[in-house]
Amino acid sequence: MNGTEFRFAIMKDKHFYKRKLPHWQPEEATFFITYRLAGSLPISVIQKLKEEYLFEKSKSYSQTKEQKEILIENYFVAIESQLEKNLNEPHWLKHEAIAKTVMDSLLFRDKEHYTLWAVCIMSNHVHILISTLPGSPLLSVILQNHKKFTAVQNNKLLSRTGKFWEEESFDTLIRNNDHYYNCVNYILQNPVKAGLVKEWHDWKWTYLHSELEKEFRLDENS
């Protein structure tokens, strides 16, 4: 990539919290995030993958921060693989009105709380790449507000009640330019790898920042 040079924000403050997975969320940074529908994977599958993750984690207590992040990323890739294989419901995001609510919500706060670089909405999960902006809420708050709003709106559309999203999201702090572009490409290629379209830009629920779109279309045609 020779075009847009990604500029990493200065990470002023660090916020760490832990649910099922550790989350390191500095302010003014860039994150690759995946979140999925509630019930989109059987508990038995989640438990098995979690046990494998904890086993790998227990092998070494002297891992660097980057090694720990890679371990979490590998866990995420395993989850992603299972999501793609799962043909059982729910797949609410395949409905146009539902997907549109999610996309519109993400775009609504673009340039206000974050820069939205890339999005891909699949039938049971969503990938986004964002850079939080100065003075914006914490990433955990941004995600909580987005998921709460879209859950309420989409439950109305589906005439249902109950959990819409799985509470836990997978967030990865972007380490460098290569990591950034790898994540962009991963997001764009999701529907292509799933066999839904031949080219990333043919998927209706893919969004790419205008600066990046020029680069990726040039690369595609070169």
Image: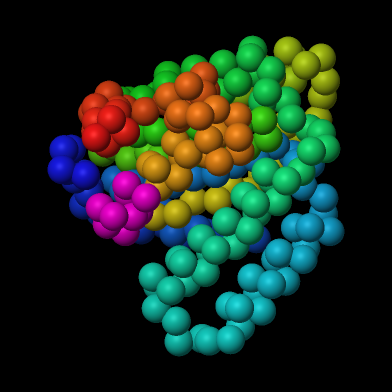
* Number of disc labels: 0
Q: Can the viewer see residue 135 in this picture?
A: no
Which residue is pictured at 63% across the width and 14% down the height? 96
| Quadrant where the image shows the C terminus | top left
Nearer to the camera, 90 or 21? 90
- The way the protein has been coloured in the rendering is rainbow
Residue 221 falls left or right of residue 4 = right
Which residue is pictured at 45% across the width and 45% down the height? 186
152 in the magenta segment:
no
Residue 69 falls left or right of residue 212 = right
In the rendered image, which quarter is residue 221 located in? top left
Which residue is pictured at 45% across the width and 54% down the height? 172
177 in the magenta segment:
yes
Residue 158 image point, x, y percent = 78, 16
| Quadrant where the image shows the N terminus | top left
Residue 45 image point, x, y percent = 79, 58
Compared to residue 90, the image places residue 14 above or below, namely below
Q: Can the viewer see residue 44 in this picture?
A: yes
Nearer to the camera, 168 or 53? 53
Residue 28 falls left or right of residue 124 = left
Magenta portion: prevailing SS class: helix
Which residues lie in the magenta part? 174-182
Compared to residue 118, the image places residue 156 above or below, namely above
Residue 125 falls left or right of residue 90 = left
Compared to residue 59, the image places residue 93 above or below, namely above
In the rendered image, which quarter is residue 94 located in? top right
Residue 112 image point, x, y percent = 32, 25
Taking the view exactly as shown, the residue that stands out farthest to the front is: 222
